[in-house]
Amino acid sequence: MQYNKVELCGVDTSKLPVLKEEQKKELLLKMHNGSPAERKRAREELINGNLRLVLSVIQRFTGRGENLDDLFQVGVIGLIKAIDNFDVNLDVRFSTYGVPMIMGELRRHLRDSGSIRVSRSMRDTAYHAMKAKEELTAQLNREPTVEEIAKALDTDKESVVLALEAIVEPVSLYEPVFSDGVDTVYVMDQVGDKSDDRDWLEEIAFKEALKKLSDREKRILALRYFRGKTQTEVAEEIGISQAQVSRIEKGAIDSIKREL
């Protein structure tokens, strides 16, 4: 743990138990089907047996001047919510569901305790959007699009985007946004100036369009437009002909244009 801190909120983190996945499933079933006494014991065991999960998540939020004890307490609240709301009929690991819940609770805490205030209505929209995203992800077995989330909330895409953007934690200018294993593109490389009149909503749509490209298409576009290589150079690096590079590049660009 960072800062070599072993005890958090009176808990010796070096002695925390770790539950196996089968044990978690068994306890979750008891929480839903057992007697009141069994449910209570199962819930307590699940909380204590997943505190290491909370520790692993809060390490991502250290270095922001926040008290580790406070972060741990908030993370435990997220863990409890995950335990109480987990659907035992879902064919997913508990940690797959629990980690986003814990992170969401921590982000809400950091947002509400920060200097930037977001209106209650916008926070409510963002909360419902995140909840809809979780439900749609379970139903579709993939991450839903902004349009699908907006449809589930019976609202427009712009309202969802604005709400989610409003609660996003500030990102460092040195945060990497793309890497091909050699060169890395950082946030600061993509910051526009006053002459950049692109609508930020179009940028979001552009990112959505990029997600739908194949790995090969993404790599070719990255080599061509991030690293400035010619089609011939790209062909040599990937191991295909220049004509194939040209065709794939054109197809990828056409695909992005259709999405926009």
Image (cartoon, rainbow, N blue to C red):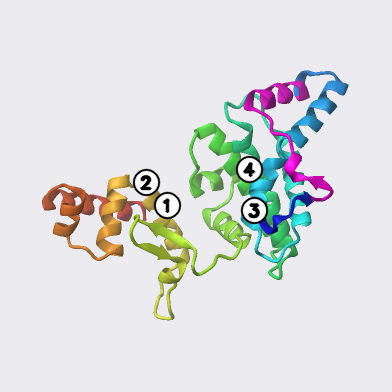
Instruction: Establish if 127 lies above or below 140.
Output: below
Q: Residue furthest right?
A: 37
Residue 18 in magenta stretch: yes
Instruction: Establish if 210 lies above or below 37.
Output: below
Q: Is residue 120 left or right of residue 215?
A: right
- Mark 1, secondary structure of its residue: helix
Which is closer to the viewer, label 4 or label 1?
Answer: 4
Residue 212 got which mark? 2
Q: CA distance from mark 4 to mark 2?
A: 25 Å
Residue 9 in magenta stretch: yes
Residue 99 got which mark? 4
Residue 33 got which mark? none
**In the rendered image, which residue does mark 1 sit on?**
208
**The C terminus lies in quadrant:** bottom left
Residue drawn 41% across and 56% down? 207
- Circle 4 Cα neighbour tier, 10 Å, few/some/many (<14 / 14–19 / ≥20): some
Tell me if I can see residue 127 in this picture: no
Residue drawn 50% across and 33% down? 141
Q: CA distance from mark 3 to mark 2?
A: 32 Å
Which is closer to the viewer, label 3 or label 2?
Answer: 3
- Mark 4, secondary structure of its residue: helix
Instruction: Establish if 69 lies above or below 174.
Output: above
Asked if disc 3 and disc 1 are in contact, CB closer than 8 Å, the reply is no
Q: Is residue 212 left or right of residue 90?
A: left
Specify the amino acid type for callout 1. Glu
Range of residues picked out in magenta: 8-31
